[in-house]
Image: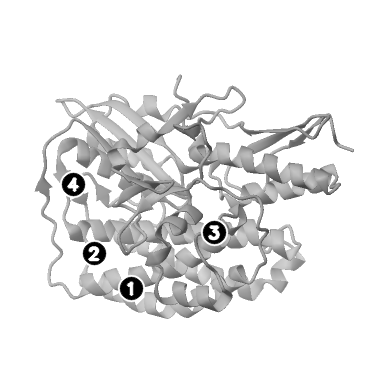
Amino acid sequence: MVKGRLIEVREITRIEGHLDLEITIGENNEVNVKAAVKEGTRILRRILIGRDYWEIPEIASRMCGVCSVIHRVTAAMAIENALGIEPSEDIRLLRELMVVGGHIQSHLIHLFYFTIPDYLGANSIIIGDARKYYLPLIRSVMSVKKWANSIVERLGGRAVHPISPVVGGLSRLPSRIDLVRLLEDTKKIKETAMELAREILKINYPDFPTEKNFVSLRGDGDIPLLVGTVDVCGERIDPVVYPGYIRYIDEKYSTAPHFLLKNNEPFMVGALARLNNNYSALKGLAKDICSEYGIKYPDYSIFTNNQSQALEILYFIEKTEDILEKLARKKNIETSSRTKRKKNTGIAVTEAPRGLLIHEYGINDNGKVVLANIITPTAQNLKSIERRVEELVRVLLDRGVGPEELKKNAEKLVRSYDPCISCAARFRKNH
C-alpha cells in the first residue's frame, strides 16, 4: 500500500520546462498535491522597469520561444492602451494571423510530440524504432507546422521572435503576393490538418477528473484571440477588470506564482475553456468533425483539452483562409491609427495557446515603464492541476493502483494542460 507516504514525480517529461509533483497520501487516503515549479525565476518585471515603452514588446517576447508571437502582440496592445493608440482593423487582422500561426505550431508540438505517445504506448514517436513506424504521421505534422511557421515568418519577419509587431502597428506590411501565396498554401493544407485531427479525436480520453470553472475570452460568433470580453465561469466582464477576479497565491514550494478565483476556487484556461465558452461559434471543418465523432460541448474532462486543441487547429486554419481572402482583395492595407484617451496604464488580455494571457504596463510622461505585470496561462492553471491530480489519485487509490501507475497517470493528466513552465516562472510578486 502507498498510504502514509510521499510520492514524488520529478521533472515531468514531455512538457515545456521543469515541474515536480509532490503527492502526499495520508493514512485515510487524504491526498495533497503540490505543483512545484523549480525553475529559476526570471524577474522579468525588474528588467522591464525603466525601459522605453517601444522596447517592451521585443523584451517581453523573449519570455518564451514557443509563445513569442502572442507575448509580443499582447505587450504592444497593452502599451497602446496606455498611450491611447488604437491600430486599424487591418493591422489587427494581420497580427491575428501571426498569432494563429503561433497557436497552431504550438498545438501540433503538444499533441503529437508530447501527448499522443501516452495513448500509443510509446515514449516518443520520433526516437528509435517508433520513428520509422510513425514516419508518415511525423511528415504530416511537419508539413502543417511548416505552413504555420511560414505565416509568422512572412508577416512577422522571422518564424521565432517575429520583429514586425510594434507599438502602433507593424514595422513592415506584407505585399499582396505574400498574402495570395499564403492563401494558396492555406487551401492546400486543410486536408492534411483534417487527417491529423482525426488521429487525436479517435482517442478514447478518460472522462475524469473534471473542472467546473473555465475562463477565456468570449466573442460573438467567433473564438477570439485578441479582442473580446472575458468569460469568468459564465459571467462576461471587461478585460480591464479581469485581474480583480483572480487572487495571487505565493506558494513557497514553487518559483512560479499560483492563482485562484476571488471565491478561492481553482480554474482552468486554455483550449478546453475557449471551446466551452465559445462552442456555438464552431463551424466548417471543426463543426463537421465534431458531428463525425459525436463530440459535444460543454465538456468538463481535463483530458479533452487535447481534442479541443485539435479542433482549434481546424477552426483557425479556416479563419486564416477567411482573413487572407479579405486582405488579398484590398488594394491597400489601412494602417492609420485612431487616437483614444491616454491612460498611462494599459492592460491587454489575450489568448495564448495555453490560455488567457495578461500584460499590464504603466508609462510615465517620459515614455518610461514604471509598472509591469504579466500573468501567464500556466500560472493560472497550477491550482487546477493540483486539485485535479488530488481527485485522480484518490480514485486510483480506491482501485488499488500502485505508486508507479499513480505517477504515470498523474503525468498524463498534467500533460493534458499543456503547461509552459518557463513562462509561469517569469517572476514572483515579492521580487
The residue furthest right is 1
Amino acid type, label 3: Asp
Distance Cα–Cα, label 1 vs label 2 = 16 Å
Q: In this view, does 216 lie to the left or right of 116?
A: left
* Eye-nearest disc, 1 or 2: 1
Amino acid type, label 2: Pro
| Residue indicated by mark 3 | 299
Name the element at disc 1. Answer: helix
Amino acid type, label 4: Gly
Distance Cα–Cα, label 2 vs label 4 = 16 Å
* Eye-nearest disc, 4 or 3: 3
Q: Earlier in the sequence, mark 1 or mark 2?
A: 2
Q: In this view, does 140 lie to the left or right of 283?
A: right
Name the element at disc 3. Answer: loop
| Residue indicated by mark 4 | 168
Assess disc 1: are there few (<14), some (14-19) or many (≥20) residues with their C-alpha within 10 Å of its C-alpha: some
Name the element at disc 2. Answer: loop
Image quarter (top left, top right, bottom left or bottom right) of the C terminus: top left
Distance Cα–Cα, label 3 vs label 2 = 39 Å
**Would you say the residues marked 1 and 4 are in contact, meaning their CB atoms lie under 8 Å apart?**
no
Q: Residue drawn at (25%, 60%), measured in percent from left and top?
A: 93
Q: Which of marks 1 and 4 is nearer the N terminus?
A: 4
Q: Position of residue 257 (x, y in %)?
A: 50, 30
| Location of residue 189 with respect to 97 vertically, above or below | below
| Residue indicated by mark 2 | 174
Q: Residue drawn at (33%, 73%), measured in percent from left and top?
A: 321
**Would you say the residues marked 2 and 4 are in contact, meaning their CB atoms lie under 8 Å apart?**
no
